[in-house]
Image (tube, rainbow, N blue to C red):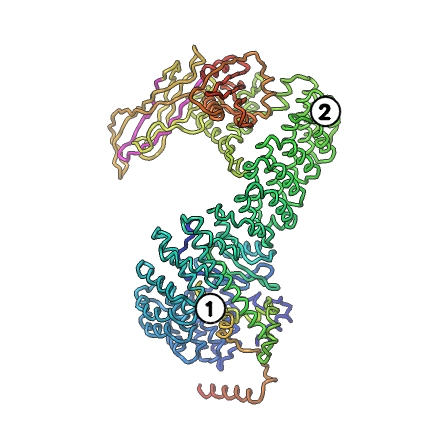
Amino acid sequence: IESLICEPSLYTVKAILILDNDGDRLFAKVRFPFELEQKAFEKNIFNKTHRTDSEIALLEGLTVVYKSSIDLYFYVIGSSYENELMLMAVLNCLFDSLSQMLSTQAGGLHESSSRQAWATQKNVEKRALLENMEGLFLAVDEIVDGGVILESDPQQVVHRVALRGEDVPLTEQTVSQVLQSAKEQIKWSLLR
Amino acid sequence: MLKKFDKKDEESGGGSNPFQHLEKSAVLQEARVFNETPINPRKCAHILTKILYLINQGEHLGTTEATEAFFAMTKLFQSNDPTLRRMCYLTIKEMSCIAEDVIIVTSSLTKDMTGKEDNYRGPAVRALCQITDSTMLQAIERYMKQAIVDKVPSVSSSALVSSLHLLKCSFDVVKRWVNEAQEAASNDNIMVQYHALGLLYHVRKNDRLAVNKMISKVTRHGLKSPFAYCMMIRVASKQLEEEDGSRDSPLFDFIESCLRNKHEMVVYEAASAIVNLPGCSAKELAPAVSGHWAFFQPASHVYVAMKHPSAVTACNLDLENLVTDSNRSIATLAITTLLKTGSESSIDRLMKQISSFMSEISDEFQGTCYPQDTHGPQGKDALCQKYPRKHAVLMNFLFTMLREEGGFEYKRAIVDCIISIIEENSESKETGLSHLCEFIEDCEFTVLATRILHLLGQEGPKTTNPSKYIRFIYNRVVLEHEEVRAGAVSALAKFGAQNEEMLPSILVLLKRCVMDDDNEVRDRATFYLNVLEQKQKALNAGYILNGLTVSIPGLERALQQYTLEPSEKPFDLKSVPLATAPMAEQRTESTPITAVKQPEKVAATRQEIFQEQLAAVPEFRGLGPLFKSSPEPVALTESETEYVIRCTKHTFTNHMVFQFDCTNTLNDQTLENVTVQMEPTEAYEVLCYVPARSLPYNQPGTCYTLVALPKEDPTAVACTFSCMMKFTVKDCDPTTGETDDEGYEDEYVLEDLEVTVADHIQKVMKLNFEAAWDEVGDEFEKEETFTLSTIKTLEEAVGNIVKFLGMHPCERSDKSLLPYIPVLLSSLLGVFRGGHDILVRSRLLLLDTVTMQVTARSLEELPVDIILASVG
C-alpha cells in the first residue's frame, strides 16, 4: 500500500470473467497488459470465491467483485484502489442485461413483460448462456470498451444489443414470411 | 439454427457445452460458408461466435489463417442482419491485431458510422478506431468530430472512448477535438458526460491550471453522472497531493461536498480520497470515516485502521457488529482492526464475540482466509503483551479455539501463541500448561504433541505441583504412536531428574517403557533409567536436562572424518564446532512466530563456509577446529575510500586468524601481494601473513593474518591491533585493463582492530541453567563485585554484559520480570575456546548506580580468570 492516490483514469475494469462451476473459462475479457498469468489467476480466483456467498475479495493486489448464478460465476476485476461500487455497477449491469436477454430469448418475442419479470434471473445459467454466446459477446462489448465503462444501465445495453428473437423453423413461418424470403432469394440470383 | 446445433450435440452425446470440442481448423473451414450467396445470417453469426469463442479461450490464430477468415468475413457486410453485422464489428476488433490489411473495411465502417441505423453507429465507431492508425486518422477526423457531438448517446460515448484509446498513439490529432469534447461534457446523458470529462482530463492533465478550472467548473455546476463525480474526485485528490496543499483549498472543499452526494458510489469515493490524503487530521477524517461505515467496503476500512487508529476508535461499536458479517475476510479484518484499536475494557466482550464467531466458521475459514487467520492469533499475541492482566481471559479463549475442529496450521498458530504467552508472562504459566496438557490428550498432530511434551518437560518440574503433569505425560506413553511416546519418555525423565520425591515413581514408569515395541522409545527409556539410577546431579544435568550444544552438521562431518581415519584416541566432542547463535537471541518482540527459525540456519552455514575456506589455506593446517567466527565483519575503512577492507575474526583453540576482505575501488590500479600488517598491544604474536596475490579493480580478494594467542599471560585476551595494509601498486589502463609491468610498494593505514573477550566465547543455549551450574561445581568459582557508575537501568547493564562477554542469557534472565523490584539475577552461559563451558551469574542491584556481583564457574581456572579480569 504505497500511494493510495491513483492516477485518475477512465480505465477502470481490468478484466471481466465468467467461469462455470468447474472453474473453467466460458468468457474472459481481459485488458492487456494483464500482469498475471491468466489461467493460474482464474484458478486462484475460483478457488477463493466459489464457496463463499459474499461479493467482494482482494486477490493478488486486485479488487474482485463477483456474483454467482446457478452454475455460473461472474467476476469483475479492477486494481486494488478501484472504487468497489463502480466495479459493482459493471457487474450488476452485465448480470441484469444477460438475465433480461436470456429470459426474452426463452420466453419468445410475444411474451408479456410481466412474464419476463419473474423469469428474470432464473435463466442465467450455463446452458442458456452458451446458447446465446453472441448475445454475451455483444453485451460485454456494449458495457466495457478497452477497460472503460461504456454503459451501466442494463436497459440501454439490452436495447443496443437488440438480439432477434427465437428462430422460427420454415414449417411454422407464415405465408408472407416465406414469400418475403423467396423474394429475397430471387433478388440475389438476379443480382448475380 | 442455433437449436439444431444443440440438438446434434446432444444426440452425439456431447456435454452441455456446444463449444467444448471446437477445433480451430474445423471452424476456419466452416468460415467458407461466408462466401455462399445468399448469406445465411444465423449460420454465419454462429460461426463468428465460434471463432470469437476460440480466441477467447486463448487459442492462437496464425496471421495467414486470421487474414483469410477476415477477408471471408468482409463479404458478410452485404447482409443487413443486425446481429450478424454486430458480430462482424466484434470480429474486426478481435482480429485487428492478428490479421493483415484490416483497413480494407474502413469504408464499410465509415458508411455504417454515418448511416441511419443507430444501433450500428456506436459499435462501428469503436471498430473503426480500433483498426485506424495515426496516418489514417486524418481521413476520418471529420466523422469523429461529428460523432463526438452526435445526439445519440451511444454514438457520442463510443466516439469519446475511442478517442481516449487513440490518445496513446495520436495525441496531437485527438487534441484538436477538445471543443467537441467540451460540448459533449454538458450532455444530459450521464455516460457521455463521464467519457467527455475523462477525455478532457487526459488531454489536459499536464496543464495544472486547466485541470483546476475543470474542477471549479464542476463544483459550480454540478454533474449528473456519479461516474464523472468519482473521476473528478480522483483528479482533485491528485491535484491536492501534488500541491501538497492546505485543507483550505477549494479542491478539498469539493471532495468534502461530495460526501453529501446522493450516490453511494460518489460518497464512497470521496471518503476514500479524504482518508488517503497524506497527513490529514482526525477532525477532517471524522465525516469521511462515518461515510465509509455507511457501506463497509473491507479493503478501505482496514487501510483506515492501519493509518489512523485513533480516528477509527469512534467506530469500534460499528466494527463489532461487523465481526458477525457473513463475509469471512471482512469479519477477520474487523477483528484485527478492533484488537489494534480496542481498549482493555472491551476485550472481554470482544473475546466472547470472537469465540462465537470462531465456532461458526470452522474449517472453511482456514481454506479461504488462512493468512488473516494466523494474523489473528498474532494480533492477540501482541495484545497480551499490552494487557498482561487479561491473560486469563485470553488463555481461556485460545483454549476454546484449540478445541474446535481445525487444520494443522491453524492449531499450530494457536499453540505458538499460547507458548509465547507462557514465556512472556510467568503468572500464566500454570494455566497455560494445564490447557496444553488437555490439548495433547486429544491431539492428532505429532509435531504439536511432541513440542508440547518438550515444553512440559522443560517447564513442568519448576511449577509448584509437578506431579499433576505426570498423568498426562504417561497417558501419552500408553496411548500414542512411537514419536510421541519417545517425546513423552524424555519429558518424564526430566521430571525425575529435577524432583527427588518424584524420582521413585518416575523410575517405575520408565521401567515399564523399557518393554516398548519401538527401538527409539526403548533406547531412550533405558538410557534415562540408567542415568537416573546413578542419582548424580551432574549426570542428570549433562545428559537429561541439557542436550548437545554442538552444531549438528558439524558433528556429522567430524564423525565421518573420525571413521575415515581410525585412531586410538576416543572421539572428542570438544573438537566439534558449536551451534552458533541460539535462536531465541534473534527473536525480536514483533517478528511473527513462524519466521523465527530462518536466521539460525543461515548462521550455521556461514560458519561452515568459513571453516571450509580456512581449511583450504595450507598455513592454517593444524590449528584445530574453528571455534568461532565473529558474526559481522568489521569495516576497517570508510565505505567511500579507495580501498574497502572488512575484517572477520576467526578464533581457534590457541590461535586467531583475521580474514580481510578487500576491494579495490580504483579503476586505474591493480594491487598485488596485499597483506595486512598487524601490531598487537598485548602479548599476541603474529605468526604469518597470507597475502592476496592480485586485487584488480572491483574484484574482492581475501588476505589472512595468523596470530598466536598470548602464552605467558593467558588472561590478557583483550587486545587492540593497529593495522596497516601493504601492497604493490601497478597502474593499469581503466578501459583495456592492461597493467604496467613495473609497480611500486605502497602502504595504507587502516583503523585499529579490537579483539574482545566475546571473540573467545561462543554463545550456547542450555535449557536448564540451574542444572548446568550444579554440574560444573564450585571448584573454580570466583566472585567479584563491581560498581557500574554510568549505567542507569538494570536491563541496560545486563545488555552490556551480554554484549561484552558474548554469552547467552539463559531462560530470559536478561529481562526483569518484575520491573518494580530493583534487583536482577541473570544467568549467562557460554563456551570458552577449547570447549569448556563457562557459566556466569550476575546479581545486579539498582540504587543510584548499578552494583553488580559476578560469579563465574567453569571446569578450568583460566576462563574464570579471563572473565573476571575482563569485566573489571
User: Disc 2 marks which residue?
Assistant: B506
Left or right of residue B414, residue B229 in this image: left
**Label 2 to label 1: alpha-carbon separation:** 79 Å
Placement of B620 over or under B372, stated as above or below: above
Chain of the residue under the numbered disc 1 shown in the image: A
What's the amino acid at mark 2? Ile
- In x, y percent, where is residue B330? 56, 52
- In x, y percent, where is residue B739? 26, 33
Range shown magenta? B654-679
Q: Residue at x 47, y 62 (%)?
A: B60
Residue B556 lies in magenta, yes or no?
Answer: no
What's the amino acid at mark 1? Glu
Front one among B436 and A144? B436
Placement of B32 over or under B363, stated as above or below: below
- Name the quadrant containing residue B152: bottom left
Left or right of residue B113, residue B835 in this image: right
User: Disc 1 marks which residue?
Assistant: A151
Residue at disc 1, secondary structure = loop
Left or right of residue B433, residue A138 in this image: left
Placement of B358 over or under B391, stated as above or below: below
**Where the N terminus of chain B falls, by quadrant?**
bottom right
Front one among A64 and B668? A64
